Image (cartoon, grey):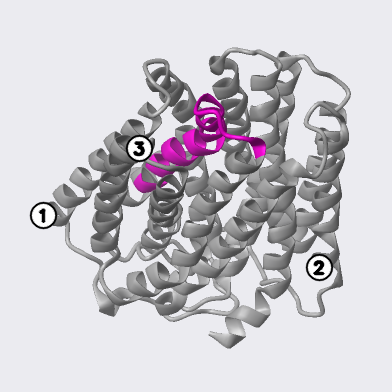
Amino acid sequence: MEGIFKRTLAPNIALILVMIGVSYLSTFLSLRMTADGYPLFYTGILYSGYCAGMMIGALYLKKIIFIKGHIRSFSIFATTISLIILFQSFSLLPELWIFYRFLTGIAAAGLFIVIESWILLLCHQKNRGIAIAIYMFAIYLGQCIGQYGLGLVPINSILPFNLAIIFCIASIIPIASMNCKAPSLHESKPLHAIALMKKIPLGFLGNFTSGLILSAFFSLMPVFGRHEGYSLLQIATIMSVTIFGGMLLQWPIGKLSDTVPRRVVIILDCLLIFLFSILLCIYYKHSYFVLLQLLFLLGGCLFTLYPISITYCCDFYDASGLTCISAAALLYYGVGCIIGPIIASAFMLFAPFAIFIYFALFSALLGIFAIYRSQKAPTIAEKNKENYQAHPGIQENFSEID
């Protein structure tokens, strides 16, 4: 455990820095469009554009990682994001913002594939849940800190863009300064996302559902806060408390998923998302403090769905294909992210709190499918779990089918 932490320290620090900038910019853009009087639909499309870029990046950018390696690829993608944000700051046209967010999503997909595959290649099968938990902890720590940047600079100025650029550029420093090498990587036989979905439907549907829910949370929860009359600081607290809940539960959920069947953990997670979402529908107006408590618990479940799902996918596949698994998981997550804000914004046309009904509905659908799969398909056999290879070979080897 300590060895994995040390080997992945530099990429995780870099990830924290870039997530501070990217998550801060995402929340800022939602609030800025609302303040400028644009319809709620535009806010949803803005985030969907970002996620469409992530989907495209997941399809094509893994080739750059195989050619350039993890360290150089990270530097390329982080610099690209910084340049795109800089160009975005030159224009206030929402149509151009959607285009720039699309380009940002492409580069962000490359960053996530680099770090995810880096960590997965350095961990043992039985410790994979904890390793991914550390990775997700870094993401959510960066997102949590990034929310409080809202109060540092005026929302109607160019300074928020500059702040995001600073953190994205700074993320290259720990990667460029590290003494140890990134894991060796050789390109394996291409894996098609549709074939992977057929082999492991529950895992990739979990990634898709996570995209549906989290994209709606990041793009529309600030709008919910505005409709309820909360200040910028209160909205930042709503966002950060929810993310903080997910951050704190990464370790116990990751440990649990390494101990009991991950399919059981997915079912439990969906049940809790449904429960806390229904409670929020009932008690969100009770008091601000009650709202924060329930969002903390909801966040603990929302933000653990993706890491559980991707770890579940990796259980069925040879270590040489983990980069392709990461790319496919991000692809389905991106598809969910494109659709999510559009559907959720339609829910919120009836009432702002309907975003919680949206969370409850899709978590229930995934939970029902997970129960169905648990009755139909066998769990992965312990004997088929492979030992960790520091320098994995090139072979295609599904252990069992979900």
The boundaries of the magenta stretch are 206-232
The front one of 110 and 199 is 110
Residue 359, numbered circle: 3
SS state under label 2: helix
Residue positioned 27% across, 34% down in the render:
361
Give the foreground label among 1 and 2.
Answer: 2
**Residue at x-position 44% and y-position 54%:** 296
Q: Is the magenta stretch mostly helix, strand or loop?
A: helix
Q: In this view, does 88 lie above or below 286?
A: above
Amino acid type of disc 2? Pro
Between the C-alphas of marks 3 and 1, the distance is 25 Å
The residue carrying pointer 2 sits among few (fewer than 14), some (14 to 19) or many (20 or more) residues within 10 Å by Cα, namely some
Q: In which quarter of the image is residue 105?
A: top right
In the drawing, does residue 304 fall left or right of residue 147? left
At label 1, the amino acid type is Gln
Disc 1 element: helix
Q: In front here: 134 or 223?
A: 223
Asked if one can make out residue 187 in the rendered structure from this viewpoint, the answer is: no
- From the image, tell me which residue sits under label 2: 174
Q: How far apart are marks 1 and 2 (CA)?
A: 46 Å
Q: Which part of the image, by quadrant, shows the C terminus?
A: bottom left
Q: Which of marks 2 and 3 is nearer the N terminus?
A: 2
